[in-house]
Amino acid sequence: YEIITSPIVPFMNIVHDRAVIEIMRGCNRGCRFCQAGMFYRPVRERKPEKILQAIETLISKTGYEELSLLSLSTMDYSKVEELVSRAQKYFKKEHVGFSLPSTRVDSFGVEMASKIASIRKTGLTFAPEAGTQRLRNVINKNITEEEILNAVASAIEKGWKRVKLYFMIGLPTETDEDINGIVALSKKIKALGLKQLTVSVSIFIPKPHTPFQYARQITPPEARKKFSILSRIKRFAQLHLHDPGKSYIEGVLSRGDRQVGNAIYKAYKNGSLFDEWGEEFRLSTWIRAFESCKIDIESYSREKDVEEELPWDHISLGISKAFLREEYEKAHKGEPTRDCRWNGCTLCGVCQEYRTINVLN
């Protein structure tokens, strides 16, 4: 697939106002909540030479002053160190900032931190996702608290002062201890000497074609109760919380069937037009739409039986349902599944279904 090197440059400020290069597609880390990680399997890496050529062309044609190396897990690109080293001279000459999407803390070495920080420090993003080791094992986020703290400390040593953390609440088997763990871990990270820490917390939404497609989604009142515990973070960091009502509706739409389509149209007719804008979203409009269509919202947010027929079962991504069931059961046991790039095939079904393999450099 071709690299886009002549994108349309907006004449207004946008959220992600930078140049982007997709350096690889796919991720086999196996986070059990992640739909993209299942959807884009297997891993396919671009050659460093093609990426470097595209970077020069993209910057010269757009005039952007910041570039992001984009993928689901950029630091897992097998030649990321070589790529950054070769691009470093060009970045310095053109005064181009270098940013990464959410960084895997277990693969963020001191050497890479040094090379990235030597260009122009724009801020780092880490995604622990859960506040305790127990819950990270459940979701298959195979990183420890020690690795997280060491990665941030290494980054600070090399000159980084701004860090953003991503967490989720409402994950399967979650308790108040896990919520308090988010506060405790965030406080430890801030105490390392950061100038600015931002903690962003979203609400877990079960997605089709993932091991957690069977899980229950928490209600808005439950989410607000958990958010009240997290409010202590405001004492030492910026705290961004997702809208519980909006997340709840997203969950219904994510696992909805044909009947939900009627409610979507009804909500539209009742004025739900620009709901992505926070000030335009009205939960009551959606509730009335579902009620008028005689749809029970809780039937879509409840936990599913692993043998239950699901509305999307007729759609194949190559992932076998047996693999998803097994992963869901392993989650409740707190058992991890390792990355198949380095630890052997996990029999998810993709390579067998499409007769392909991971493509690494």
Image (spheres, rainbow, N blue to C red):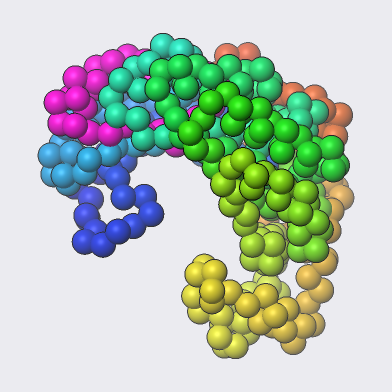
Q: Where residue 356 sits: x, y (%)?
A: 50, 27
The secondary structure making up most of the magenta span is: helix
Is residue 99 on the magenta stretch?
yes
Quarter assignment of residue 189? top right
Residue at 76% across, 63% down: 220
Quarter assignment of residue 332? top right
Residue extending furthest top?
111
Is residue 321 among what the camera can see?
Answer: no
Residue extending furthest front?
235
Vertical position of residue 111 compared to residue 163: above or below: above
Q: Which quarter shows the N terminus? A: top left
Q: Nearer the viewer, residue 351 or 197?
A: 197
**Quick check: 359 left or right of 345?**
left
**Quick check: 111 left or right of 57?**
right
- Magenta span: 78-107
**Quick check: 96 left or right of 173?**
left
Residue at 34% across, 17% down: 115
Vertical position of residue 355 compared to residue 168: above or below: above
Q: Which quarter shows the C terminus? A: top left
Q: Where residue 164 sits: x, y (%)?
A: 52, 38
Residue at 31% across, 41% down: 20
